[in-house]
Image (spheres, grey):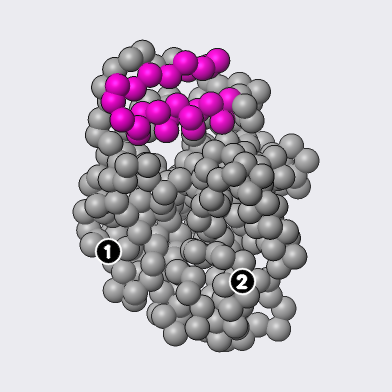
Amino acid sequence: MSGVRLGVMLPTGGEHATPEAIVQVAQEAERAGLGSVWTYERLLRPTVPIAMGGEGGPVMDPPAAFATVYDPLEVLGHVAARTERIQLGTSVVDALFHNPVVLARRIATLDRLSGGRLLAGVGQGWMSQEFEAAGVSMKRRGAGFEEHLRAMRAVWGPDPVRFEGRFHRIPECEIGPKPVREDGPALLVGAASPAALERAARLGAGVSLVVFDWDQLAGMIAAYREAARTAGLPAGPVVVQVNGAVSAKPLDERTPLTGSAEQVAADLDRLDPLGVEHVFWAMPGAPEESVASIAPLLTR
């Protein structure tokens, strides 16, 4: 049997996103014995077509679910108070839209309130309209994102805290609370390119990946682990997001980790050799009933 932990995205986006639905799904997932629940960040829904995933991606109308997305950290704080054991993940918070000191303190506070259950997934963001609304240049991506994470790591480290960078400066001070773990919360970097994989490895962070096909997934994980070896650092946790669902019946045509419970179970065995720790299913904008229905199927 596969040792990978299973999770589900909470219904935090779209017309079906309500406080009641969020708590219902989180508690059902915990009762079913799942390992994690997840949130994501979206600031707005543009009223014009966008390139999904950023420049070069397919141009399409933005999903309706983008119009209403609950704040990921606020949601997990609410869920932490209504659950006991299940891990709480973000995939991802767009770090560049936030001041690093403020974001680091919010993450540390949530980690403390949840008893160290947080899996802190962060990313650079990709939608130009969100960068414009946040007042942040897209040129901050890359080196600016790396500096942002280093500043957050400084906040999580021992006092006195001090950081000097190109974009951010933290004067010598004391900042708390600190995360439960001395080395900070489990940090994941959303990665979809060789540069992002190398950056995550160089920072000693894990990675959050979206699976499209098996060769693509295996190649990305191998590249990440090789980058970690080159940096002389241990590889962090690998989390895989599935943009699809588990169904009640087998599917003839399907993408990895979708289909019936039995088909998914067979697929899970392919994740163990890759060292994947968590896999979760994301259906943004889906009714809470359909999201909650995944829990018993995953238990099977």
Identity of the residue drawn at 66% across and 36% down: 48
State the image coordinates of residue 279 (x, y, percent, origin top left): 51, 65
- Give the residue displayed 23% in from the left and 47% down from the top: 113
Q: CA distance from mark 2 to mark 1?
A: 27 Å
In the image, is residue 104 part of the stretch drawn in magenta?
no
Residue type, label 2:
Pro
Residue 127, horizontal then vertical, whole percent: 62, 35
Three-letter amino acid code at the position of disc 1: Arg
Label of residue 85 in the image: 1
Between 107 and 281, the one nearer to me in the picture: 107
Q: Secondary structure at mark 2?
A: helix
SS category of the residue bearing label 1: loop
Asked whether 255 or 22 is in front, the reply is 255
Number of other residues with Cα within 10 Å of mark 1, as a class: few under 14, some 14 to 19, many 20 or more:
some
Dot 2: few (<14), some (14–19), or many (≥20) neighbours within 10 Å? few
| For the residues bearing labels 2 and 1, Cβ distance under 8 angstroms | no
One can see residue 232 in this view: yes
Up-down: is 75 above or below 24? above
Which residue matches tag 2? 273
Magenta region: 144-168
- 255 or 276: nearer the eye? 276
| 265 horizontally vs 56: left or right | left
